[in-house]
Image (cartoon, rainbow, N blue to C red):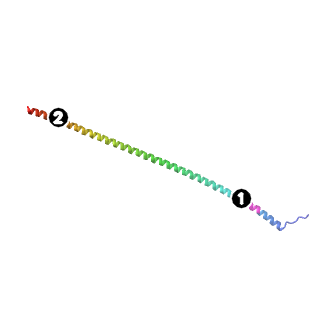
């Protein structure tokens, strides 16, 4: 048998097969690259989501601490104001009590003086009658 020379159609078939194999290899490489890029993109998105969640958690915690601080300050101010009002009311009550004691003492003194004057007048009348 004599070795026959490949025909033109055999050459085209071989080239087509090689081209198809090359294209399939390149397509597989492209798919792998797409998967790699998608994986990186997903990982980056997950990291951003975690960072955003952590930032939100930190912001909320900070806001809660600030709200608690303001509440404590407001409560302390209210208690201080209530203590001042109570002290002022006690002072007013002491002042009223002191004024009442002074008025009572003045009335008692006036009554003592009136009795003393009455007793003197009685003595004078008795001495004039005699």
Residue 1, horizontal then vertical, whole percent? 91, 63
Residue 7, horizontal then vertical, whole percent? 84, 67
Image check: 77 left or right of 19? Answer: left
| Residue underneath mark 2 | 116
* Residue pictured at 49% horizontal, 47% vertical: 65
Asked which quadrant contains residue 31, the reply is: bottom right
- Dot in front, 1 or 2: 2
Residue 128, horizontal then vertical, whole percent? 8, 33
Q: How many residues crowd around disc 2 within 10 Å: few (fewer than 14), some, or many (20 or more)?
A: few
* Residue pictured at 59% horizontal, 53% vertical: 49
Q: How many residues crowd around disc 1 within 10 Å: few (fewer than 14), some, or many (20 or more)?
A: few
Up-down relation of residue 107 to residue 13 (above or below): above
Is 102 or 36 nearer to us in this picture?
102
The residue at the far right in this view is 1
Asked which quadrant contains residue 8, the reply is: bottom right
Helix, strand or loop under label 1: helix
Membership of 25 in magenta stretch: yes
| Residue underneath mark 1 | 29
The residue at the far bottom in this view is 8
Do tag 1 and tag 2 residues touch (Cβ < 8 Å)? no
Residue 38, horizontal then vertical, whole percent? 65, 57
Asked which quadrant contains residue 104, the reply is: top left
The residue at the far top in this view is 130
Image check: 36 left or right of 57? Answer: right
- Label the magenta part by its dominant secondary structure: helix
Q: What stretch is highlighted in magenta?
A: 20-29
* Residue pictured at 68% horizontal, 56% vertical: 35
Q: Which of marks 1 and 2 is nearer the N terminus?
A: 1
Q: How far apart in space, not on screen, are marks 1 and 2 (Cα)? A: 128 Å
């Amino acid at each position: 048998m004599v070795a026959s020379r490949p025909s033109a159609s055999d050459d085209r078939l071989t080239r087509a097969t090689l081209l198809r194999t090359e294209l399939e290899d390149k397509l597989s490489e492209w798919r792998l690259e797409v998967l790699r890029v998608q994986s990186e993109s997903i990982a980056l998105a997950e990291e951003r989501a975690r960072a955003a969640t952590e930032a939100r958690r930190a912001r909320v915690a900070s806001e809660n601490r600030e709200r608690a601080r303001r509440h404590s300050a407001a409560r302390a101010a209210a208690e201080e104001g209530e203590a001042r009002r109570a002290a002022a009311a006690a002072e007013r009550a002491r002042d009223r009590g002191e004024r009442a004691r002074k008025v009572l003492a003045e009335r008692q003194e006036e009554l003592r003086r009136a009795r003393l004057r009455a007793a003197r007048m009685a003595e004078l009348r008795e001495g004039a009658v005699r």
